[in-house]
Image (tube, rainbow, N blue to C red):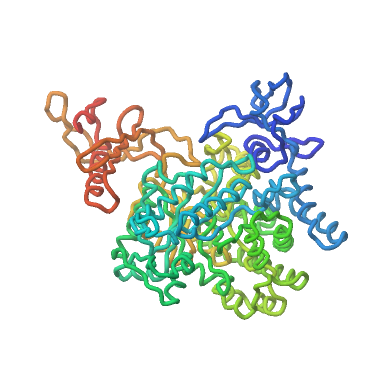
Amino acid sequence: MQSTKQGTRLTGLSEKIFLDRYALKRQGKYGVNVGETVLVLVKDDSRFPQKEVGEVTAVDGDRVTVRLRNGETWTGAKELVTVAIETTPEQMWKRLAKAIAAVEPTPEKRAEWTEKFEYLLQDWKLVPGGRIAAGAGASDELTLFNCYVIPSPHDSRGGIMKTLSQMTEIMARGGGVGINLSSLRPRRALVRGVNGSSSGAVSWGGLFSYTTGLIEQGGSRRGALMLMLNDWHPDLIEFITVKQRMDKMNNANLSVCISNAFMRAVKEDLDWELVFPDTSDPDYDQVWDGDLDKWKALGKKVDVYKVMKARDIWHTIIESAWKSAEPGVVFMEYYNQMSNSWYFNKIICTNPCGEQGLPAWGVCNLSALNLAKFVREDENDVDWDALGQAVEWAVRFLDNVIDATPYHFEENRQNQMNERRIGLGTMGLAEMLIRLKIRYGSPESLKFLDKLYGFIAKKAYLASADLAAEKGPFPMFDAEKFLQSGFMRQMDEEVREAVRTKGMRNVTVLTQAPTGSTGTMVGTSTGIEPFYAFEYVRQSRLGKDKQYVPIVKEWMEQHPGEPLPDYFVTAMDLTAEEHIRVQAAIQRWVDSSISKTANAPADFTIEETKKLYELAYELGCKGVTIYRDGSRDTQVLSTEKPAEKTVEKTAEKEAIPSNDGTATAKKSEYHRRPQKLTGATYKMKTPLGKAYITINDINGKPFEIIVNIGKAGSDVFAMSEALGRVSTLFLRFGELPDGNKAKLLI
């Protein structure tokens, strides 16, 4: 960081993120002046563009010369330049504090809360959600809500196009969107009006995904989309496996909504029916909205399309998540049992990152407390008083956002005014644990997390109750019904009594978002995640950037030559089970949900993945996502490790064919897979259908072969997968001169 007249200037990737995503700015085509700080598009790539920060040194007509922060000089068109109006966080904090306090009822209150909000924002104690940071007090009418869930599409061409239009309008103004596709009739179902058949829910999901890739939000990022499907839908298997092809739905996150009944069927090895309403019912077009329980409650008929073993479906979900990190799983029935809005607003989908389950027309209203700012290292403890005050002020900040934001759909405004949903979360948890010398994922950490997040939950609920006493409860509040939610049943009596006597200003208060961009900008750990690595490469729309964790640099400077203590752990140092147990410990005290990834090594098995998902359900997680290292062709975070082979030698000997056909004895050496490999995928025609063959290499030598033919779950798919594994094992054992193993395989 560097001090300027305007405040403290960020450096490196932090500055790039700040200027690109959150600072006020204008397009260069509207004017560029010498000396201005600008963001330059130095590499125009549709998938991974590269932007750099610099200062304008010359302007010649439509051409601009910029001295970049890395010392290089760039000259190009004005239209490739974005001019920063705000260049420091202090400028942004003043703008945000004034804008969010502006909805207070009196001049005295506005002055009081402008000062308090600015103090809360200073030094990144509270980090607002991205849309708040970018839009509050700005001239553009950008939404201050990060994400939305819109109603499931009406099962008609007009209904689907209406949903597409709603999604596009929201994304164009900076919001991500969640859509549950379960209202759409399955593939090959009869469409009577045109005497044809439906292409199915998954195909229409592909349309939503494709459109998302075309939208740039508020000039600073691409659209974000979550697509969900319920566990009873006949297109379920197609939905589960669609992302095993990397060219399908790559602009959407996918999750399956799982019921308690399905999990019981898995446990007891029961059959599971894939069903859909009778589309010939005269009330179908007027009544059907994707809620199967409501349809059945009306005495309406459902058609059984297929019966499968629940365990076979579950295995397909697990296998697909193991292969491609998707779909995620949301335990939606349990979610609704815990939901404070259970009695008036059913949760139907989550936002794109999964931390906020929402009803139709629901919104994400997010900010995060930076826990690393509330550590008293001299006492090896949390600054509980400061944290408690920050929680109280942050609840009011987010409640004010509801009244400060523009609403582009009246349905959003009505829903949010009726429930006043907010989501206060945290970032910097991993840094806090390191500063307190507690190992992330350890039994000690789980005990501490229960205390920490229980404290935050209690303070947040008491603050919302106090706001209800001051400004009134949310209109749909019913004390007795509210207190019957699964979440409120576990709250202590002080909170329950405050809610009973004062009411609640907000239907939900707490959410744990990923905070990927904001956490990186601030320089701390993101969300509730551990540090991915202490040195890593971050791939984003700003390009590739090598990152070093500040707290590690700080510790090494204070302890030169000493190894890091054992409480310095990264995501890959933890077991996947430790990831899930941390999530479960925090979920107990979060009334919405959590965006959390259970990182697993490349050799993590399908069976281990299955046990992990079932553990998450048993521990009360509302959802689960696993990322097995290397299971995607690209990833946001990666480490730069040389592609060297880790060798485990055994005492056994193996016979290795030589060029002349004789056998030579050599010690058997098994070469373990490194975390990162490169290669190519080839599409070939076979008598059994198209084959996709991936060959990954190390230093030009084939090291791994992956073969996919047919649909997941079929015999040919299993055989082709086995062939790839056997071929890979052959490549990894022993040594031969270059090319010999490949020749033997061919």
Q: Quadrant of residue 52?
A: top right
Q: Relative to the observer, which residue lies in front, 149 or 85?
A: 149
- The residue lying furthest to the top in this view is 60
> Percent position (x, y) of residue 113?
81, 58
Residue 616 x/y as whole percent: 44, 62
Q: Is residue 184 left or right of residue 221?
A: left
Residue 440 seen by the camera: no
Position of the N terminus by quadrant: top right
Above or below, 693 against 318 in this view is: above
Q: Does the rendering let one see residue 62?
A: yes
Relative image position of residue 116 (x, y in whole percent): 80, 56
Q: Is residue 359 left or right of residue 54?
A: left
Front residue of this view, candidates 240 and 625: 240
- Foreground: 482 or 629? 482
Is residue 553 depicted above or below 121 in this figure?
above
Count of marks, rendered view? 0
Residue at 51 percent of width and 47 percent of height: 570
Residue 311 appears at what percent x and percent y?
A: 31, 63
Quadrant location of the C terminus in the rendered image? top left
The part of the image, by quadrant, that contains residue 487 is: bottom right
Task: Between residue 137 and residue 504, name the one nearer to us.
Answer: 137
Residue sitting at the far right:
108
Q: Residue at x 44, y 61 (%)?
A: 182
